[in-house]
Image (spheres, grey):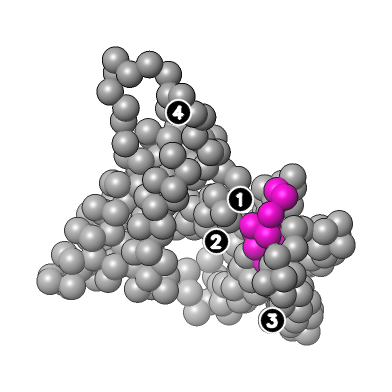
Amino acid sequence: MTGTYATVITVVALLLAGWALIAAAMNRRPTLLLFAGAVLLEALLLVFAVGGVVQMTGSDRHFARAEFVGYLLGCLAIPPLAFYWARGERSRSGTLVIALAFLITPVMVLRVQQVWAGTVG
Amino acid sequence: MADPVVDPRPRHTPAPTGQGFGRFLVAIYGLFAIAATSRSAVQLATEFNKAPLAYLLSAFAAVVYIVATVSLARGDATSRRLATWAISIELAGVLIVGAASVLSPSVFQHPTVWTGFGSGYGFVPLLLPFVGLWWLRHTR
């Protein structure tokens, strides 16, 4: 749960965020490619969530399991919500909404890891 | 804020509050709505007895953020009025709770979104109501 895969998601999300922020700075409305980025991130998060639940059920360690699952579901909810809300926006604000989703994802992944490690929750 | 009741229909339609910059603002409000709701749900469910005041405040803040998000996103005349109320309450909340938490920290050992003027969230909770009210004025 704290492994390489979480790092990969974090790096991808930050790269996507940088891209989205540059696009917003250049006054671009969200492009199809940016939405594709959100779909890619969602796919990565889906694997993360499934892996997390599988690891959780295979572990008899004591940690805040409900919160763990809650944060995983929270991760999964972000890209679709941003996708839905940014769709149809004809200004850079739509791009910023997507950027926000990309920026929150690493924070959420970090929280997942913290709950898994038992340092919070 | 509220137009007088006897006023005829406004001659111009106000700009929608959920588009343009509002699209981004609603996303930020939505983020706080989700964060505050999940946080207070966990607090109320698992450790309500530890700090009832703080946790009820968290739940109250969550409701305020939800109302602000939905009404800003909808942006019709009623929603606009509702948003103005919600964001005004949000402003009062962050100022009162912020000041109270600085003056008597012992009461606020268990943090809420508004503790320390939202210092746990980069002071965004303090900034947000000002931006929200400005946006409502701007789009009027």
Q: Residue at x 32, y 51 (%)?
A: B90
- Is residue A100 shown to the viewer in this render? yes
Q: Can residue B63 be seen in this snapshot?
A: no
* Quarter of the rendering containing residue A79: bottom right
User: Label 1, on which residue?
Assistant: B20
Name the kind of residue labelled 2 in the image: Glu
Q: Chain letter of disc 2?
A: A
Task: Give the crowd class for mark 2: few <14, some 14-19, many >=20 residues within 10 Å.
Answer: some
Q: What range of the chain is rendered magenta?
A: A89-99
Nearest-to-viewer mark from 3 and 4: 4
What residue does disc 4 label? B77
Instruction: Report the residue marked by disc 2.
Output: A67
User: What type is the residue that disc 4 sits on?
Assistant: Ala
**Quadrant of the image for the N terminus of chain A?**
bottom right
Q: Position of residue B77 (x, y in %)?
A: 45, 28
Disc on the earlier residue, 1 or 4: 1
Discs 3 and 4 share one subunit: no
Q: Secondary structure at mark 4?
A: helix
From the image, give the main secondary structure of the stretch colored magenta.
helix
Labelled pair 1, 3 in contact (Cβ < 8 Å): no
Which chain contains the residue that carries disc 1? B
Marks 2 and 4 share the same chain? no
